[in-house]
Image (spheres, rainbow, N blue to C red):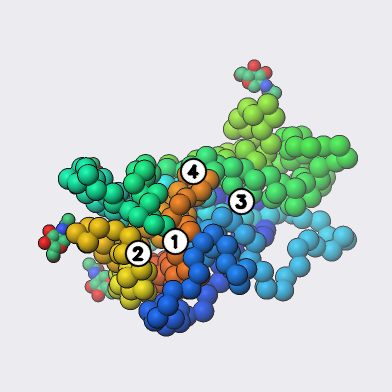
Amino acid sequence: MANIPTIALLALAGGSCAAAMPNSPTSSSISGAPGPTGTSYPSGFEIKKSWGHLSPYDDARHFGVEKGFPVECELSQVHVLHRHAQRYPTSWPTDGGGMEDFGYKVGNYSKRNPEKKVGSGPLAFINEWEYILGENLLLPSGAATEATAGALFWSEYGRLLYRAGKGDAIYDPSMNTFPNGTQRPKPIFRTTSYPRILESARWWLSGFFGNTGANSSYTSYDLVSIPEEENFNNTLSSTSTCTNGSSSGDYSAERFVPTFTKAALKRLQQHFPDDFNLTSNDVYAMLNMCPYEYATLGRSSFCAIFTQQEWTDFEYSLDMSFYGNFGFGAPSGRAQGISEI
Ligand SMILES: *[C@@H]1O[C@H](CO)[C@@H](O)[C@H](O)[C@H]1NC(C)=O
Ligand SMILES: *[C@@H]1O[C@H](CO)[C@@H](O)[C@H](O)[C@H]1NC(C)=O
Ligand SMILES: *[C@@H]1O[C@H](CO)[C@@H](O)[C@H](O)[C@H]1NC(C)=O
Ligand SMILES: *[C@@H]1O[C@H](CO)[C@@H](O)[C@H](O)[C@H]1NC(C)=O
Ligand SMILES: *[C@@H]1O[C@H](CO)[C@@H](O)[C@H](O)[C@H]1NC(C)=O
Ligand SMILES: *[C@@H]1O[C@H](CO)[C@@H](O)[C@H](O)[C@H]1NC(C)=O
């Protein structure tokens, strides 16, 4: 899988935390009557929090560590490790590849059967739907997430680190001094050459350093772009460095798909023509459509057609991917990103 969890940049403490592992899936998704579908659920369940790495950023809770630090302390350095934000999918079969195939399937079915509708009932929207997502690029919603994260980090840590004074809104190089007043070197950030990672870093930095008049703040910092290439030891992304380290998670997720989509497949099949041959991979593609269209278009009709349990299982499948590709389940998991810690 190409570059999914690559971390974007760092330099200056604190850091964002990935979502905790959810509970194991229960068996209710493969039994009997479907639960309610929709974009809001009687239980108060929020689907946006069950999209794994595709969920909009949310602060991790329950670590019991308070924000801030004692008033008598002064910050001397701060480090942040940050992931890229909302992007188009990769071409991997359980990601963009599967969604694109589903899009072709719908398009080709309509072409062959101009007199028939593809979807009916809750799926009638599919008759007007087309797959429009591209691949890999950072989206404007991702740029906004990064800029917001950078700006918040400036507010919480940057101001203290650079001793921003009364009335100072943004960073100014004159703040970048040691306590004795000597000028400090420019702060250094690192990122990779992968386009969405590089763009994420730049947007984060423009949030952190301020971007008055929406003009670039390039001159305020040095950004080191580490190539993501074979035979190059990239400490921020091991995708090209450890080529045998990262796809077992995708295979476990792929095996889980037919099991957890069984009830949805049965339910949704009724709203497609008999000869459409809806598969569990199509159902998985429809689940994926929701977060990706949400990131791209601000909403998606696919979000309303699944149950709470199906979203929970969807998230679990994403966790299986990440566990096996980049976490403790991956041969290179413990080493990925270690040089930054
Ligand atoms: C039909 O599928 C092929 C790929 O199999 C694709 O290139 C083509 O665009 C599809 N047609 C429509 C109308 O979606
Ligand atoms: C000021 O502090 C820095 C960092 O401790 C030190 O490297 C530098 O030599 C000091 N400059 C003067 C003029 O004392
Ligand atoms: C932003 O850039 C434009 C074009 O280079 C320049 O005319 C303008 O003065 C800049 N504004 C600020 C606030 O720096
Ligand atoms: C990458 O780092 C390892 C361990 O230090 C070293 O053995 C290897 O030669 C390096 N590879 C490249 C291409 O620099
Ligand atoms: C890749 O790693 C697996 C174990 O995780 C090992 O069995 C296999 O031989 C490795 N392949 C190569 C080409 O190193
Ligand atoms: C659906 O499956 C049936 C039976 O396997 C097959 O005959 C038919 O060609 C398939 N239709 C499509 C559109 O793939």
Give the label, 3 or 2, closer to the camera.
Answer: 2
In front here: 180 or 47?
47
Give the label, 4 or 2, closer to the camera.
Answer: 2
Marks 3 and 1, how far apart in space? 43 Å
Q: Amino acid at mark 4?
A: Leu
Question: Badge 4 is on which residue?
Answer: 297
Q: Position of residue 2 (x, y in %)?
A: 35, 54
Question: Badge 2 is on which residue?
Answer: 268
In front here: 169 or 182?
169
Circle 2 SS class: helix
Q: Which mark is residue 83?
A: none
Give the answer, above or below, for where 121 lies relative to 259: above
Q: Position of residue 14 (x, y in %)?
A: 67, 60
Image quadrant in which you'd find residue 288: bottom left
Q: Specify whether tag 4 is near ligand 1 (CB below 8 Å).
A: no
Circle 1 SS class: helix
Image quadrant in which you'd find residue 25: bottom left
In front here: 299 or 333?
299
Q: Position of residue 42 (x, y in %)?
A: 60, 70
Q: Are marks 2 and 1 in contact (CB under 8 Å)?
A: yes
Q: Which mark is residue 305?
A: 1
Q: Amino acid at mark 1?
A: Ile
In front here: 208 or 288?
288
